[in-house]
Image (cartoon, grey):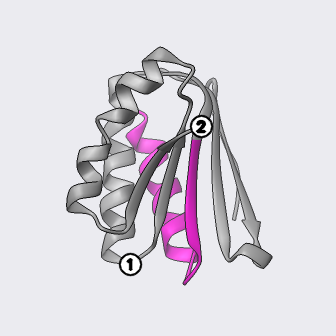
Amino acid sequence: MNNLSFNKLNIEVKEEEENNLVRVIWSGTSDDISPSKILTPFLSNIADKIGTKKLSIELYDLEFMNSSTVPPIVQFIKYCSQKNIEILILYSSSKEWQKFSFKSFETFAIVYKNLKINAV
C-alpha cells in the first residue's frame, strides 16, 4: 500500500504482518478546502486491500485538520464497517483541538461496533 503526501498532509501506511495490522499514520496539516477528492479514493484503496487485517488510524501526530477533513474520515469508517474491518482510532490527549474533535467520534463507536477510539 502506498503513502500519501498532499499539500501539508502526510499519511504513512505501515503493514505489520506479525500483528495482522495496517497502521495509517497521519502527520502534518490537513487544511485543504476539498480534501475528499484525494482522501476518499486513497482511504478506500486501503480498505479494499486490507483483507482480514485490523486497522489503526493514528492521528496523534496531526497538527491540525479543518472540518472538511472529517467527512472523508467518516466515510472511511463507514466503508470499513461494511467490510467488517476492525478499526482503532488513536488521537492525542495532549492536543486540545484533538481532544475536542475526536472525542465526538466516540458517538460513531456506538453505531459502528467495529470501531474503537482511544486517546494516547
**Can residue 83 be seen here?**
yes
Q: Is residue 106 shown above or below 51?
A: above
Q: Residue furthest left?
A: 111
* Start-end of magenta stretch: 34-58
Q: Quadrant of residue 4?
A: top right
Image quarter of the N terminus: bottom right
The answer to if 37 sits in the magenta stretch is yes
Circle 2 packing at 10 Å, graded few (<14), some (14-19), many (20+), is few
Q: Which residue of the protein is positioned furthest toward the top in this rendering?
A: 96
Viewer-nearest of discs 2 and 1: 2
Which residue in the structure is indicated by mark 2?
Answer: 120
Please provide percent x and percent y for residue 53: 59, 77
Residue drawn at x 63%, y 23% is 8
Q: Which residue type does callout 1 highlight?
A: Asn
Residue carrying label 1: 84
Instruction: Report crowding for label 1: few under 14, some 14 to 19, many 20 or more residues within 10 A (C-alpha).
Output: some
Identify which residue is drawn at 57% across, 75% down: 50
**Number of disc labels:** 2
